[in-house]
Image (cartoon, grey):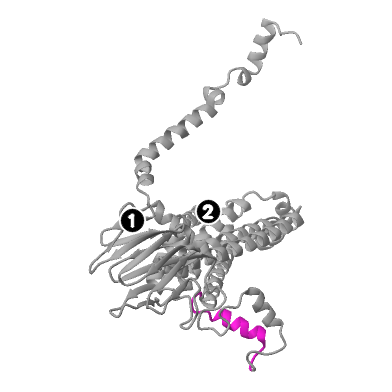
Amino acid sequence: MSAISAAERTRLEQKFPEVFKTSFLKRHGLIVALLATAAYLVFCWFFFNVGPALQNGKWDRASIYVQDWYSWRAQPRLRFGDDGVVTPQWSSRGQYPADATIDWLTPHADGSMTATFGSAADRLDITTRQVDVYLNGEVWPVTITADAALAPEGGPAAIQQDRQKVVVDFGFEGQAEIRANQVAVQRRFFGWANFLYDPTSPLWGNDLFSSIGLMLSGDRVNPDMSNAQYVLNQWLGNKAWQHADILVKLFQTLVMAFVGTLLATLIAFPLAFIAARTITPSGAANWGMKRFFDFIRSVDMLIWALFFTRGFGPGPIPGIAAIFLTDTGALGKVYAEALENVDDKQREGMKSVGASPMAVNRYGVVPQVLPVFVSQSLYFWESNTRSATVIGAVGAGGIGLKLLESMGTNSDWDKVAYMVLLILLVVFLFDNMSNAIRSRLIGSNT
């Protein structure tokens, strides 16, 4: 293709100046935006002290918390008696029944005890005078004195002297703190301890498959109820995992999200007609209603939840009120914008036959915007399922409060993981359900 002449080029430049003489931002806007973003990130890095925060982060503690999500720790204290006997003492969260035989914790006739970590090559042989630490089959004796435990000289990095105690690290399998009067053992196992039944249950020790087999069995364990009901009662009554309480709190969260969104939809629907300037000709009414929507949605849902919690006390009522107020403002704004963009042909047709203003809105406007309204409400309902979890943590009830309680113990991270998975499952189901309903509504309108 031959080049155009100078005269032709001049003619085209005069006719289409916006093509040949573009602004600086149009020609270099992407590069400017990238440089501005990079400069902003550098500013944030120094302004928020990101480097020192990362350097001072307790990553070892974070690693332990992550491990606690998918594993559990048995934590007996092996106390030294004056008679030379080593006695295990369990906390109130003991994962074994009182008379259970523990394969990794073996008492001996002479009063000593062996704690095994994974295999016999990694273990502790414990007496009240000395603790023999075995790492990969090699023994390292820790001496017990009246006021301290003393690590062996030249020992490996897994054995560390920490003031008056000795810390032994067995990796994922656990660790031990050897003191002058006891050995605090943390023995880690993969999975969740006693997830099905707590140690006080007659079904303790049954796994999922044996529980299913028991449910299908014809011989009743409890003559007063079926095996399926008995297994369900024992699972819901698990004192360690509190399945019944967690499921009730999850249901409260779903109710908060549903009722709050429903009330917001019912209130925002008529108010949006006042805010829409194409529906209500009064400029003062339009302006006042839009500012009302701006006010109640500009206050974050979490702030409303804190406000109502102080007024009504803990429970789902403050959560419902917080969702209701915030979504009334947000849905009212969205609804009003949809009303201002309706096709006026249907309205004019209704007016031409002498219909009243109420009838014009009912038959000329609502059929156009109803699928959009329902679609937006479904989206907010799905979003509020997540938001209700957050506001529950500040006292509005639901599973959010239960989640915060488990985090506060600093030892129930497996239960935290369980509740997080339940929340993810519910959000996934509700997201797909609302998407399917929205697709049908929008599709039926096309």
Tag of residue 160? 1
x 30%, y 66%: residue: 179
Numbered disc total: 2
Asked which secondary structure carries label 1, the reply is: strand
x 34%, y 61%: residue: 141
Q: Nearer the viewer, mark 2 or mark 1?
A: 1
Q: Position of residue 14 (x, y in %)?
A: 63, 14
Q: Label 1 amino acid? A: Gln
From the image, which quarter does the N terminus lie in? top right
Q: Indicate whether residue 227 is drawn in magenta.
A: yes
Q: Position of residue 33 (x, y in %)?
A: 50, 31
N-terminal of the pair, mark 2 or mark 1, is 1
Q: Are marks 2 and 1 in contact (CB under 8 Å)?
A: no
Q: Is residue 144 above or below residue 353?
A: below
Q: Indicate whether residue 279 is drawn in magenta.
A: no
- Image-quadrant location for residue 354: bottom right
Name the residue nearer the viewer: 343 or 425.
425
x 64%, y 58%: residue: 373
Name the residue nearer the viewer: 352 or 361.
361
Residue corresponding to mark 2 = 286
Residue 172 is at least partly visible in this image:
yes
Asked which secondary structure carries label 2, the reply is: helix
Q: Label 2 amino acid? A: Asn
Q: Among all residues in the image, which is located at the extreme left? A: 147
Residue 151 in the figure: left or right of residue 288: left
Name the residue nearer the viewer: 422 or 215.
215
Region in magenta: 224-241
Q: Position of residue 20 (x, y in %)?
A: 61, 17
Crowd class of label 1 (few under 14; some 14 to 19; many from 20; radius 10 Å): some
Residue 266 in the figure: left or right of residue 49: right
Q: Position of residue 135 (x, y in %)?
A: 43, 58
